[in-house]
Every structure is written in structure tokens, then in C-alpha cells.
Image: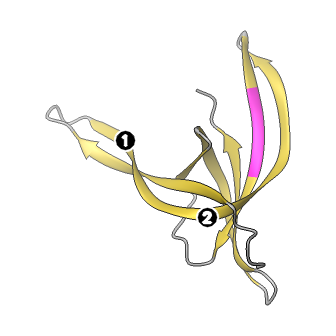
Amino acid sequence: MRAGILNELIDIYKPVEEINEYGERLFTWKLKYTTRASVSWDSGSRNIENSEIVNNYTKTFTVRSYVPVTEKDEIHWQEKKYRIISVEHRKELSFNGILIRTELINE
């Protein structure tokens, strides 16, 4: 991986299960790791679903190979949340990193 290509700061959040006093399971997101990444745009479209405009954007985040990330995590970047679709560890000589494919979470 080339030096200087990881120029964006991202936060990786993990789901944490908590049980309240009524025995109900609640999932909250807690900060797991903050790192630098390279962000590339894959595709995007605007659709109408259930009379609402939904933006379907997919991005690929490239991080170093030591970053602890799983498919259950969530990435926050530029005040937007991205659901992780796949995590691909690549160990080639010219590229030693992780490719994370994501989609925008519409709230």
C-alpha cells in the first residue's frame, strides 16, 4: 500500500447487547476503533420506496491489515453511517490491507 493514500478518518462501531431491568435485549453502538482509510465510490442511485426517496450508495473503504473489523460492525464517516457488506483481507506483496465494501444506511 502506498504511503499517503489513507487520508480519511473513519470510526468503526460495534454492536453491544444490553439487557435492561425488564429482561429486554437492547443493542447499542459503541466506538471500537478509529483509523485512517482510503475511500472510493462504487455506485449510487436514488430510488423511491414506500413514497420516500432513498439514496442507495456503496463505497469501499481500504484500511491497514491490523484493523479489527468484522461484518457485524458499522462505519461512521463524514456524519453518515455505512453498513458493512463484506470484509476482504488481501495479503499480496503490493497490497497488504483490508477492503471493506459498505452501503449507506438510510435513516
SS for dot 2: strand
Quarter in which the N terminus is drawn: bottom right
Q: Residue at x 82, y 85 (%)?
A: 94
Question: What label sits on residue 27 in the rendered view?
Answer: 1
Q: Which residues are magenta?
A: 55-59
For disc 2, the marked residue is 36
Density class for disc 1 (Cα within 10 Å; few <14, some 14-19, many ≥20) is few
Task: State whether the magenta stretch is mostly helix, strand or loop.
Answer: strand
Q: From the top left corner, tell me how far across and down residue 12 is, in percent.
A: 51, 56
Q: Residue at x 69, y 62 (%)?
A: 7
Density class for disc 2 (Cα within 10 Å; few <14, some 14-19, many ≥20) is some
- Is residue 49 rendered to the left or right of residue 84? right
Query: Which of the 4 image quarters holds residue 36?
Result: bottom right
Q: Is residue 77 above or below residue 55?
A: below
Question: What label sits on residue 81 in the rendered view?
Answer: none
Mark 2 or mark 1: which comes first in sequence?
Answer: 1
**Disc 2 to disc 1, C-alpha distance:** 26 Å
Quarter in which the C terminus is drawn: top right
Amino acid type indicated by mark 1? Phe
Q: Nearer the viewer, residue 3 or 26?
A: 3
Amino acid type indicated by mark 2? Arg
